[in-house]
Image (spheres, helix red, strand yellow):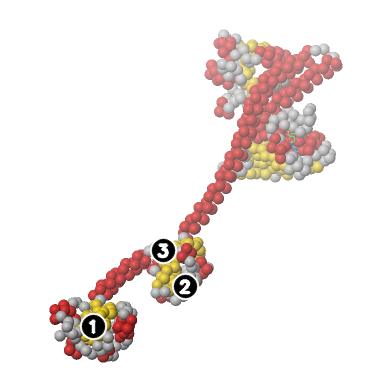
Amino acid sequence: MNSAIPDSSPALGGVLDVIDAGVIVVDSARRIVVWNGWMAQKSGIGANAALRRPLEEVFSGLRTDRLVQAVSDALAFDNSGFLSHTLHPSLLPLRGSNGQPLLHNIRIRPMASNGQSYCLVQIDDVTETVRRQGVLRDRQNARYRAVVDSALDAIVTTDLSGVIQWMNNAAQRQFLYDADEAVGQPIDLFLTNPADWPSGQEQDDAARRITETSGHRKDGSVLHMEVTTSQWRSDGRVFVTGILRDTTERKIAAEALKRLNEELEQKVEERTREREDVLAKLFNAQKMESIGQLTGGLAHDFNNLLAAILGNLDLLRKRLPDDAKFRRLLDGAIHGAERGASLTSRLLAFARRQELKPKAVDIAALMSGMTELLERSLGSSIQIETHIPVDLPAVHVDINQLELALLNLAVNARDAMPFGGSLSISAACDTFADGATVPDLGGGDYVRITVADTGVGMDETILAKAREPFFTTKGPGKGTGLGLSMVHGLAVQSGGALRLSSKAGQGTRVDLWLPRSPHEATSESNVVQPSLKLASRHFRILLVDDDALVRMGTADMLEDLGHEVVEAGSAAEALTLLQSGVGLDMVITDQAMPGMRGTELATQIGRKYPGLPIILATGYAELPNEEDPGLPRLSKPFRQEDIAKIIDAVIQRGDAGAKVIALRR
Ligand SMILES: Nc1ncnc2c1ncn2[C@@H]1O[C@H](COP(=O)(O)OP(=O)(O)OP(=O)(O)O)[C@@H](O)[C@H]1O
Ligand SMILES: [Mg+2]
């Protein structure tokens, strides 16, 4: 019998015995009145031993009196109660079938029957449920650990005072500390500024925050991080967990990108400036080129006219009666025409179209020959110093033009020193690799001639324009503005370069580079040949020129020299004349002619009539080097004396050399 309740149904007793839970009922004096089979089995106390005995007596030696207390409360105050195994792990000494302690919860409920107060104590076995929950929890924990440990970012948990409680594998790799070393240390172990880690409890909104900060590793190296923290609670305690993402590489890359951007901007600016510079230079070069072409063409035509004027004036002087007044007028006209000729030659020099006769020139010898001329031109208030090394190699240049160029530079210096000063002319060797720093100059060996004065100098504007043709600050009638243009043209045409350096009030320095000559300067190269005696022999000369005025003037001069002249207005006419069998001793032909040029005519004549001397009259450098047939040349404008000299030279060369001149066939 498991019930001591009077009148209780025997069927009820059966029910109670099959229920899978412990059922105890006590009366108002806490004496046990119901004790089912489950209780007898799990406690090892049979119903007979339990019934009618007070609860506390049956379970004497319990560690807590919570059960007795709860039962008393139910009986006295009609209160229900619940005792959980989590708070009271071993309420009653119950064991499972395997002999292991049985985890259980207890519900206490007051009840009444036949006017009597009772209390129902129901015991539920939760051993299996708790075990299952444990397995589940372990699984969850393992998953949670796997997730956290496989994270690439460092994850660190501290308590609210910032003491490290836990860290994942990534944190160990990132900071180079083992978890054992770091746990228990303050967060300053990782962060440069611990204030970046939340301390103290924060409101929900502020509980999550993101900070850019820096930290350090165990080896002292610094790293940049983005730190995201949040607070959470467990068992009434507040913890902070942070994800500390290493952004060092990103930051370095961003900084490098920023630097690169800045450098790029700077480069773009530089390139733009360079481009503008180059464009300005190009514009200037194109301008100079156009002016050069224009002036070159004009100068060529003027040259022809001046040739005719000078030739005719020469003849007039010879033929007019010896009257002093006539002579003065004629001399004036000749002087004017000569000045015009010198002007056109400067123009041609600027246009780089002058007729150059370059040869190996010894600068030291040239300078010593010029000293007197320079002293005379510069006056006593200017001191002249020359520094030319004795072993200076020869330069490849037209000696007369170089002399003229140096004179131009000296005169410029004189004009810049109205109250005296000093002029220094020096020379030295310069060798440049390709892409030399001097504009217009390719790689190679050069001689640099430097002309420096202590004069007024030039401001930037004047310096930029000084080389332009017709630029002068000397006032109308005083300067042509062609001096430096001529020097520059000569330098470039000779394969060299010119550089001006000057500042207002600080004098001027002009550097003139000329290519070194592969040959030694011959002594006669610098010596002006003594004037030859005019030839006494008279020839029949074929004169070819398309310009009738020039042709007439030249013919007059030749006839005046005693020669017989056959005129041709073109190369074709000349060839026809030659073919007709006119006996001829010599041909003088102009180079620039429409149809066939002088050089081509010379080649044809050379083929058909070998040995017939040919003189080429050229107004400017219209002969590309490869076309130069090596003929004797007569530079326009020429005077009668020049024609006489070249005819003499041609005849002398013929007499002395192997070439036999076919005279009047
Ligand atoms: N040594 C120098 N010192 C100061 N200014 C100079 C010097 N050389 C040239 N210049 C300036 O450059 C300008 C141009 O010189 P350039 O020789 O081409 O012509 P110019 O001397 O004026 O005329 P010209 O040569 O026909 O007498 C001069 O007018 C002068 O302003
Ligand atoms: Mg000048």
- Residue at point 32%, 79% (across, down): 79
Residue type beneath disc 1: Val
Q: Which of 1 and 78 is in front in this view?
A: 78
Q: What element carries label 1?
A: strand
Compared across the picture, whether 606 is left or right of 85 comes to: right
Quadrant of the image containing the C terminus: top right
Quarter where residue 180 is shown: bottom left
Q: Percent x, y for residue 177?
A: 43, 72
Which residue is situated farthest in the top direction here?
A: 580
Image vertical order of residue 78 relative to residue 435, above or below: below
Q: Mark 2 points at which residue?
A: 160
Closest to the camera, between mark 3 and mark 1, is 1
Q: Percent x, y for residue 161?
A: 48, 74
Q: Mark 3 points at which residue?
A: 153
Residue type beneath disc 3: Asp
Q: Mark 1 points at which residue?
A: 25
